[in-house]
Each structure stands twice: as structure tokens, then as C-alpha cells.
Image (cartoon, rainbow, N blue to C red):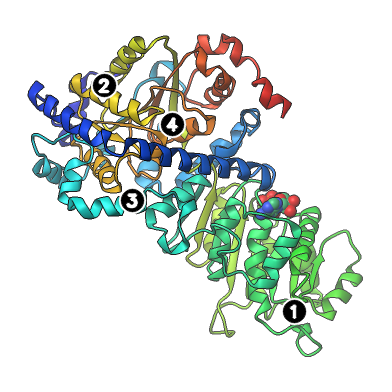
Amino acid sequence: MPRSVSELLAQQGGAAPKLRFVSKKEREAHRDKEKQAEAAAEAERLQRTKDARRAWEGQAAATSTSEAAGAPNKRAATPSEQDTPEPSDDGGSDAIRQRYLGARPDRARKVRRSNDPAKRFQFEWDQTEDTTDPHQLALAESVQTPVLAGRAGLEGSERHGGRRSVLKSTLDEKHWTEKPLSEMKERDWRIFREDYGIAVKGGAIPPPLRSWRESSIPAPVLDAIAEIGYKEPSPVQRQAIPIGLERRDLIGIAETGSGKTASFVIPMLAYVAELPRLDEANAHLGPYALILSPTRELAQQIEAEARKLVTRLGISVVSVVGGRDITEQAFHLQRGAEIVIATPGRLKDLLEQRIVMLGQCHYLVMDEADRMVDMNYEAELDYILSNLPRDATESRERRVTMLYSATMPPYVEKIARTYLTRPATVLIGNAGQAVGTVDQQVEFVAGEEKRKARLLAVLDSGLPPPMIVFVNQKSTADQIGRELRRAGWRVAVLHSGLSQTQREASIASLREGRNEVLCCTDIGARGIDLPDVSLVVNYQFPTNFPSYIHRIGRTGRAGKAGRAVTFVDDDDAEHLFALKQEVAKSPVSKVPMELARHPAAQAPPAAARGA
Ligand code: ADP
Ligand code: MG
């Protein structure tokens, strides 16, 4: 049950919003200004927004079909695909995300997931979890300007100097697909990573690949990629390849079928291509690069993928796996193989028999590390690793070590800690979300008036700010924003019709507690970074299902409980099946009877089934 407002305020201590009701006059002045701003360039902006959206949606659709089958780009998944992912995997990757990416340990520890239905709807907001920085609070107080408080952006643009920001905004309106590489800003990269579900950790991470063309992959490899027919890099390839090309250690976490092989083989080839080919003089020293794989089948798949990519480089690739004639493998190794792909057991045998050496191997990939551990290969791994050159003092260079895994249990973590040096971590998944902690509520609401009434009631349920209300159109965002202000809420509006400066000011006003509610469209909300959102309301169901996932992922981050309330009606029929599946998958949500029984929620839409 929601707690009373006073309880929550008390709990939040100083972070409580400074409730301030705006007078009628203020509100009218407010509204007039807003109307003027709105009218300006509305049509032109609308068009541009549409174009950008279309470009992006086209991109996302293309991604889902042309990329590796089953690439975990949930944004591009069709409703019929939504039901297939194994729930255990989802939970696992959330846990990994919390552990590896950003969830501060003190917060992660406080995840309290209750199975008790009575507690299910309680928003767990612990005073000790309150992250409001007292400094920020003081700032928020001092910045509060009576008339403009609550204005989306205006005060921001004034503070930043109006004219320049207009110019700047025209530039920033462009979606990343329309920008040359040189114009990409931090925010563009953030949106880009969101689009592809890429999360990263570990110091300065190079920007992901927008296309094969824009990368520094050696030309012969690029030619091979074109020949194979990989039109676009997959998400894991986009981020792992640039890191690999910097020769950094890397932890890659992405599910099966996401194109991990090429993501480590390509930088490996770039590395090996710069070294002299092996010949009689140095072949006996062993390979330059080694890929370890838990099973024979996987090793052979990696070999096949690597062979496709090396065709133009004259690099030889040999796999040494159990169950095959050891003398034949020894023969191939002795002729010289720059790249060796091996299962740990067989490689250990070969090392012990001194058939192979690893004295010049400065590049190691452990693929499917979790499975290697499951198969009890830890001792073999230790043995193999002890045969590799140790560090820069022993040889002319530092070893590059990469570890790929679908999950990150503690023993894999231990391997990573033992053998990797300051690794970059790349995690591919659900657009950077932790939706497992979001209590998803769905309400059937018929008619605009009821919708508004429910919105007010839901906002009034006692959750702490910031809260986000999502709508589908810019004009609706403005309109709902106005209505909420009329009802006494301090609201910032965010959509693509606002300049970059205004958008930033909107976000800042929420972050600093000057506003309580953000009323925004999907496009407006893209790339925003607003922590600790307690509630997301989908005033309208988004026009495409992946946006739903994206929206609700604004709350429930970093292991905190979050609530998402979604209004639907019969017009949303095409999404109800997927919605039901999604809610059912959530460990903290309950499918309401009306959704469970809705005719449109019984099977995927016909179009999707036929596809
Ligand atoms: P993982 O190791 O993540 O399970 P793989 O590397 O085995 O995935 O790749 C899965 C499949 O996707 C392979 O058949 C591979 O040839 C294909 N693939 C890899 N990268 C791309 C790409 N950029 N575009 C299209 N197909 C790709
Ligand atoms: Mg693989």
C-alpha cells in the first residue's frame, strides 16, 4: 500500500520536494508564454521529428532482420519474439548488470524483492537509500525562481544565453544517423548505445561503431566482411571491436547468437596482421593468438567464422580439440598457425607433451567462460595461463586478455579478476534496463476524461518525485503538462520540439527537485539520464512495443523498486498480447484479470504470426 505523503516526506528527510502551489495569475502568464513558444516553428519541427523517428524506426527494423539471428536487441524484437526469451536469462542478466555496470554496491545490496503479495505494491524507499546530495539540495533551493519554477526549459535557456542555444539546438535536433562522425556528441553516443542496448564500464571507452565503414578495421578484413555479407555490425561488435582495436582487456557479456565471435576475431586479426607471418624460424614458438572454447563444436564454429574473415590475410587458423587425431593437429601446429582455437583439455595435453608452445602468444580470448567453468576446466585454464608470457617485462608486450560469457557467476568473475588487467566491460541487453524490479500495472481506461482522472489519482499515490508521464505526441505532452500544473503539480515538459538547452534544463529541474513530474514523449526522453524515478505512467500506450520496455526501464534502476502504470484501451489491441507476456515475466508484477482475459491478449496479432 502506498504510504502517506507525510510519511514519505519524513522518510525522505531533506530531500522532500518543496511543495509550492502556483497562483492562478502565475499559471496564466506561464501558459501564455508557453503558447508562444509552442506556435513557433511547430510545423517544421513536427516534420523533422517525424523524419527522425521514421529514420530511426527504419534503422531498428533493419537491425532486427539483417543482424545476427536472436541478437538481443529487444527494441527491434517483434511481439512474437517477446515471449520466447527464457525468464531465467533475464533475471541473470539483470543481476550481472547490477554487479557489473553501474549499480553502486551499496545500493545493489539493498535490493529487497518480496514475494509477499501484500508487500508487492509497496514502494520500497529507504531513507538510507536516499541519494540526494545535500549540496544539490542547497543548489536547488537557491536556484528556485518563483515565477519560472516549473517552466520546462525557459529559465535554462535564459541562463545559458538564448540566442546561441537556438543555433545549437538546430544542430542538436539532428539524430545521430544524420550526423557526420565528427559531430557526434556525448549525448549522441549515449542515445546510440541505448538504441543498441549497449552498456559499458571501465574507464574511457571508445565510441561504438556506427558502421563498418567508419571503423579502423584493416581493409582486407573489411573486404572479407563485405564478402560474407555482414551489412551492419551487431551490437556487441559495435562496442567490442573498437575496444579490441585499442588492445584493451575486455569482458563481453551477450547472449548466444549475438555475433560475439566476430567481435573478438576481428580485433585479433588486426593485431596478428601487423606481425610477421610464421615461418620455419618461429613457427615452433607457437601461435600469436589463442582462443579457448569449452567444446569441440564451439571451437569448430569459431574456426569456421575466423576462416571466413582471414581469407585475404594469409593468416592460418588451426583448431585443436579433443576427439580428433592428436598427431594430425600436431602436424598443423608445427607448420605454423598464427591463430589457434582450442578446448582446454586438448591444449593442456599438447602443452604437457611439448607439442605446442605459447611463448609468443600475447592475445588470449576465453569464449563462453561460464561453460568452461561448468565443465570444470578451471585447472586446465590455470595450467594454460601459466604457460603464457606473463607480462611486459618478460616479452616485448603486454598480453591482451578477453573473456566472453553469457552470465557472470562468481567463479567467472574470479577468472576475470585473476587474468584480466583493468578490463573494459561490454554488456549487451535490454537497452540498459533492469526491468525485473519494475512493478508493472496495467489499467483499462476508456475515454479521455477517465484517463486524466486516473492519471491524477496515480500521481497522487504518494510516491516520491521524480515521476515520468509518457505520451505519444508533443502536443499531448504540452497539454497534459498544463493540466497537471493546473492540478498543482510542478511539471517539466520534454519533447523534441524543445531546444537541447531547454531539454537539459527540464531534466535538471527534476534532478534538482524543483519539478516533480516530467511529461514527455519517447523522442524527448531519449538519451536522458534521470536517476531514481519512482513512477512511470504510460498515459498512452506507445505506438511500438519496444518503446514500452524502454519507457518502463526509466524506473526500477540500480536495483530499486519502481512502478509503471500503463493505461490501455481497445485501441491498443495489437500490443495486448505482448504486454501480457511482458507483465507475466516480471517477478514483481501481476497480470490484471482484464488483461489476462482480453480477447486480443490470447494470441499474437495475426500479422506477426504470418511473418
Ligand atoms: P555468439 O558467439 O554470440 O553466439 P556467433 O558469433 O556464433 O554468435 O554468431 C551467430 C551467427 O551470426 C553466425 O552465423 C554469424 O555468422 C552471424 N553473424 C555474426 N555477425 C554478423 C553480422 N554483423 N551480420 C550478420 N550476421 C552475423
Ligand atoms: Mg559464440
Q: Earlier in the sequence, mark 4 or mark 3?
A: 3
Task: Report which residue position mark 2 lands on.
Answer: 462
- Please report the residue visible at 91 percent of the width from the left and 72 percent of the height from the top: 327
Task: Report which residue position mark 3 lands on.
Answer: 170
Task: Report which residue position mark 4 lands on.
Answer: 552
- Please report the residue visible at 67 percent of the width from the left and 76 percent of the height from the top: 272
Q: Quadrant of residue 210?
A: bottom right
Q: Quadrant of residue 418?
A: bottom right
Disc ID at residue 101: none
Please identify, in this view, whether the residue under mark 3 or under mark 2 is nearer the observer.
3
Number of numbered tags placed on the structure image: 4
Q: Is residue 42 left or right of residue 97?
A: left
Q: Position of residue 348 (x, y in %)?
A: 76, 67
Task: Report which residue position mark 1 lands on.
Answer: 286
Query: Cβ–Cβ below 8 Å for labels 1 and 3?
Result: no
Q: Is residue 331 above or below residue 266?
A: below
Q: Earlier in the sequence, mark 1 or mark 3?
A: 3
Q: Earlier in the sequence, mark 4 or mark 1?
A: 1
Q: Earlier in the sequence, mark 4 or mark 2?
A: 2
* SS label for mark 4: helix
Disc 2 marks which amino acid?
Answer: Gly
Q: Is residue 163 left or right of residue 425?
A: left
Disc 1 marks which amino acid?
Answer: Gly
Please identify, in this view, whether the residue under mark 4 or under mark 2 is nearer the observer.
4
Please identify, in this view, whether the residue under mark 1 or under mark 2 is nearer the observer.
2
Please identify, in this view, whether the residue under mark 4 or under mark 3 is nearer the observer.
3
- Please report the residue visible at 61 percent of the width from the left and 28 percent of the height from the top: 79
Q: Earlier in the sequence, mark 1 or mark 2?
A: 1
**Real-space CA distance between mark 1 and mark 3, rounded to the nearest whole angstrom:** 56 Å
**Real-space CA distance between mark 4 and mark 2, rounded to the nearest whole angstrom:** 19 Å
Quarter of the image with the C terminus in it: top right
Q: Is residue 385 left or right of residue 33?
A: right
